[in-house]
Amino acid sequence: MSGSSEVAERLALALNQNGMQRMIARVLAAFLFSERESVTAAELGEQLGASAGSISGAITMLRTVGLIEPAPVPGSRRAHFRMRDDAWATMMSSQNEMIQVMQEIAEAGIASAPPDSPAARRLERMRDFYAYLFAELPALIDRWKEEQDT
């Protein structure tokens, strides 16, 4: 196994240990460490020794969260995919919806908890944290994009 393959497997293991499904983590690592601009599902399956179905599921999930996209390859009959240039910012931007949901859940919890109770205090802290993230994340992503453009 080459050095980059070992690092890719370490990344996949770390992602899996932090909640990402194993095959999605392995496919993401394969995209990140690929020396090619784009790859096909068949190439990923061969590289990872995985079934077409598991590769297809991982590609669908990575497309859904905005990390990969279809890549045009003139003359090829197979679908090619590549990492998006703005993959990480896109993924974090899509987190705003989840942040807002967490904030709303905290609000509902506060409304149902006894005032000044330990639960109410914990839920207020949760609400305040997610409100802060919701307010700050767009500006943070915009600053990062501006730095990338310079």
Image (spheres, rainbow, N blue to C red):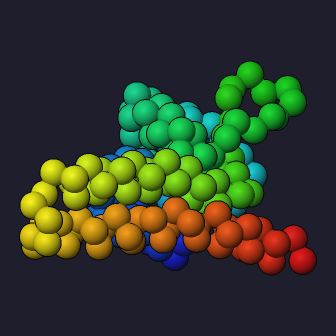
Residue 2 visible in the picture: no
Looking at the picture, how far across and down is residue 26, in whole percent?
43, 54
Q: Is residue 102 left or right of residue 100?
A: left
Compared with 121, 44 (above or below) is above
Q: Residue at x 67, y 41 (%)?
A: 69
Q: Where, quadrant-wise, is the N terminus in this rendering?
A: bottom left
Q: Where, quadrant-wise, is the C terminus in this rendering?
A: bottom right
Compared with 111, 61 (above or below) is above
Q: Quadrant of residue 76?
A: top right
Q: Nearer the viewer, residue 2 or 147?
A: 147
Looking at the picture, how far across and down is residue 47, in whole percent?
50, 48
Q: Is residue 29 left or right of residue 17?
A: right
Compared with 48, 58 (above or below) is above
Looking at the picture, how far across and down is residue 12, in whole percent?
40, 62
Q: Residue at x 75, y 52 (%)?
A: 37
- Give the residue furthest to the right: 150
Q: Nearer the viewer, residue 26 or 63?
A: 63
Q: Quadrant of residue 117?
A: bottom left
